[in-house]
Structures are given as C-alpha cells and as structure tokens.
Amino acid sequence: MLLVIIAGIVLKITQAEWIVCIILFGFVITIELINTAIETTVDIAMPNINEKAKLAKDISAGAVLISAIISVIVGLIIFIPKILIVIGL
C-alpha cells in the first residue's frame, strides 16, 4: 500500500485512480480479515486435523490471493502508462 501511495503521489494519478486504489486497499484488507475469521473459526470448531477444515482454510486463503492478484492487475493498468510516459516511451 505504501508503495502505491508513494507512486500515486510521484506519478500524479487522477482522483478517479486514487478512488480505485483506495477501494482495492479496502478490498484486499477486508478479504484478509474474512480469511482470518474463517481460519480462527475452523480452528475452534475442528481442533484436530480434518480434510474439510483444511479445504475451508485453503479456499479462504485462495480468496486473499485472488483479491491481491486482481489488485496488482488493476494497479498495473493504472501505473504502467504513467511510468512509460516518465521514462519517455
């Protein structure tokens, strides 16, 4: 997040681009909180090793990964054109 904020300031992204970045920050953090809640709940409900409990935890971790990947893709769409302008391409 910090790198995106610094890059946004340096590259002077638009208000709409800031809004998208802030929404994506919240999106990833929210999914991570949900993942933590699911993992904690599963640990309480199933203290012993259980394949279905492991699957639930893996799926919730996968949701975090997908949200992060989507955020990176959107960030690249926002920042690559601005970086190319700065380096003169």
Image (spheres, grey):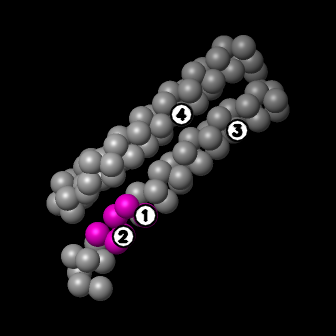
Q: Amino acid at mark 1?
A: Ile
- Residue plotted at (47% across, 51% down): 71
For the residues carrying marks 2 and 4, which lies nearer the camera in this image? 2
- Residue plotted at (39% across, 46% down): 20
Q: Are marks 2 and 1 in contact (CB under 8 Å)?
A: yes
- Residue plotted at (48% across, 30% down): 30
Residue where numbered disc 2 is placed: 80
N-terminal label among 3 and 4: 4
Question: Range of the magenta residues?
Answer: 77-82
Residue where numbered disc 4 is placed: 31
33 lies above or below 19: above
- The image quarter containing residue 36 is top right
Local SS, label 4: helix
Gap in angstroms between the C-alphas marked 3 and 4: 12 Å
Q: Amino acid at mark 4?
A: Ile
Farthest residue toward the top? Answer: 45
Q: Are marks 2 and 4 in contact (CB under 8 Å)?
A: no
Residue where numbered disc 1 is placed: 77
Residue 8 on image: x %, y %: 24, 55
N-terminal label among 2 and 4: 4
Residue where numbered disc 3 is placed: 59
For the residues carrying marks 3 and 1, which lies nearer the camera in this image? 1
Gap in angstroms between the C-alphas marked 3 and 1: 27 Å
**Is there any visible trace of residue 43 in the rendered image?**
no
Which sits in the foreground, 5 or 59?
5
- The local crowd at label 1, few if under 14, some if 14 to 19, many if 20 or more residues have their Cα within 10 Å, is few
Residue 72 on image: x %, y %: 46, 56
